[in-house]
Amino acid sequence: FLTHDVQTPKPHCPQTTFASDSSIESDEEIRHLDEEIKELNESNLKIEADMMKLQTQITSMESNLKTIEEENKLIEQNNESLLKELAGLSQALISSLADIQLPQMGPISEQNFEAYVSTLTDMYSNLERDSSPECKALLESIRQAVKGIHV
């Protein structure tokens, strides 16, 4: 048996310039990657800030939309109320003018209501030009007939 240590020879790896070149390249790559990471972080921060602004705008727009929808609902309710009131006034006018015949028109009805009102409007507008006693008497009859209508 052997009594002394046998040393295995270590492989000889001579230090070459490849190692230092590799180290320099690695350092440059690391610096380049660090710079890219820094740029990406800055870009991410900007995008996150933009996203927060957009979220704020979206929230504001949603709030405005809700307000507009509520206002529209109130307007619709008011319109319904006004349409009912208009229908009532139209019926009252039709009833009040049932016995008054306008020239070249039949008796007032729901079907000719708008034409009847248009004719009355024209008559009142042209009162200065057509001041005949018949026209004045007709308009006075109409005034008396609609006196009881309260708006």
Image (cartoon, rainbow, N blue to C red):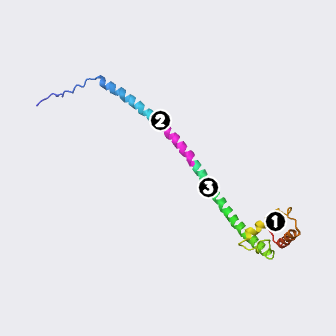
Does residue 53 show up magenta in the picture?
yes
Q: CA distance from mark 3 to mark 2?
A: 38 Å
Badge 3: residue crowd in 10 Å (few <14, some 14–19, many ≥20): few
Give the position of the C terminus as an image quadrant.
Answer: bottom right
Give the position of the N terminus as an image quadrant.
Answer: top left
Quadrant location of residue 6?
top left
> What span is in magenta?
37-55
Label 3 sits on a secondary structure element that is helix
Which of the numbered marks, if any, corresponds to residue 65? 3
Badge 2: residue crowd in 10 Å (few <14, some 14–19, many ≥20): few
Q: Give the residue at x 61% y 55%.
A: 65
Quadrant location of residue 18?
top left
Label 2 sits on a secondary structure element that is helix
* Residue 85 in view: no
Q: Which residue is mark 2?
A: 39
Say which amino acid is labelled 2: Glu
Q: CA distance from mark 3 to mark 1?
A: 47 Å
Residue 62 lies, in percent from the top left, at 59, 54
Q: CA distance from mark 1 to mark 2?
A: 80 Å
Say which amino acid is labelled 1: Met
Of callouts 3 and 1, the N-terminal one: 3
Does residue 52 show up magenta in the picture?
yes
Which circle, 3 or 1, is nearer the viewer? 1
Q: Which residue is mark 1?
A: 123
Say which amino acid is labelled 3: Leu
136 relative to 19 in the view: left or right: right
Residue 150 lies, in percent from the top left, at 81, 70
State if disc 2 and disc 3 touch (CB < 8 Å).
no
Which circle, 1 or 2, is nearer the viewer? 1
